[in-house]
Image: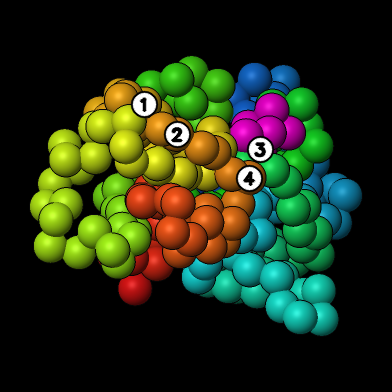
Amino acid sequence: MKKGLFLLFALAVVLVSVSVFADSIELAKTSTVESIVKSGEIRVGFEAGYVPFEMTAKDGRFMGFDVDLAKALAKSMGVKVKFVNTAWDGIVPALVTGKIDLVIGGMTITQERNLKVNFTTPYIVIGQAILLNKKHEGKVKSYKDLNDPKYTVVSRLGTTGEQSIKRMIPKAVYKSYEGQVEASMEAGLTHVDLAQNLISVNSI
């Protein structure tokens, strides 16, 4: 029975998850799935600011595409789901230290992350996108044009968008924000020129 549950979980994750992954160290010690089934609860970590995948409604409820997937996964396992809203730069440490059972969210599979956690097969693939201040319309035609200290760019802290900015346009003035919404709003102000890694730009 336990073996069957493990296979069901693995299949469900592979089918529905972009960035659902489990801590390989803990898996070596004991089955994460068995622990979840035994406790009757699955703790799902994400940052509730990644529209339209994870959001917080006015009444405080979590909602979004990934939230629905997590609920479906919990239902298929016969357990309750507990959502753990976590700052993005601390989400992998939370998984490794056992504060959550899995992460579901738009996380790029990188070599560095692969050394710490296991990823499932992606269920959606997107690329980096930019949100450009309207005052630069027709003037900035490539990201290369932004590699100048006269431009200010922002992104979410701890993301591959942040890494891309530092690597590809190092001369630009850079600011980081905890959430996507904050970065997007900041990009709408006159003193910020670009926001990086915005899912709403190119994946809906």
| Name of the residue lying farthest toward the right | 39
Amino acid type indicated by mark 3: Ile
Contact, mark 2 vs mark 1 (Cβ under 8 Å): yes
Range drawn in magenta: 89-94
Q: Position of residue 41 (x, y in %)?
A: 82, 56
**Looking at the image, which residue is at 68% across and 33% down?**
90
Q: Are marks 2 and 4 in contact (CB under 8 Å)?
A: no
User: Label 2's element?
Assistant: strand
Q: Looking at the image, is mark 1 or mark 4 earlier in the sequence?
A: 1
Q: Marks 3/1: CA distance?
A: 21 Å
Q: Secondary structure at mark 3?
A: helix
Of the residues tagged 2 and 4, which is closer to the observer? 2
Which residue bears the numbered disc 3?
Answer: 91
Q: Quadrant of the C terminus?
A: bottom left
Report if residue 52 lies within the magenta region: no
Q: Nearer the viewer, mark 2 or mark 1?
A: 2
Label 4 residue SS: loop
Mark 2 or mark 3, earlier in chain: 3
- State the CA–CA distance, disc 2 to disc 1: 8 Å
Left of 89 or right of it: where is 168?
left
**Which amino acid type is marked by label 4?**
Glu
For this rendering, which residue is in front, 190 or 71? 190
Q: Main secondary structure of the magenta part?
A: helix
Name the residue that disc number 4 marks: 178
> Where residue 5 sits in the image (x, y, percent)?
64, 52
Instruction: Determine the CA span between mark 4 and mark 3.
Output: 12 Å
Residue that mark 1 sits on: 166
User: Of callouts 3 and 1, which one flags the residue occurring earlier in the amino acid sequence?
Assistant: 3
At 32% from the left and 37% from the top, the residue drawn is 150
- Reading the image, the residue beneath label 2 is 174
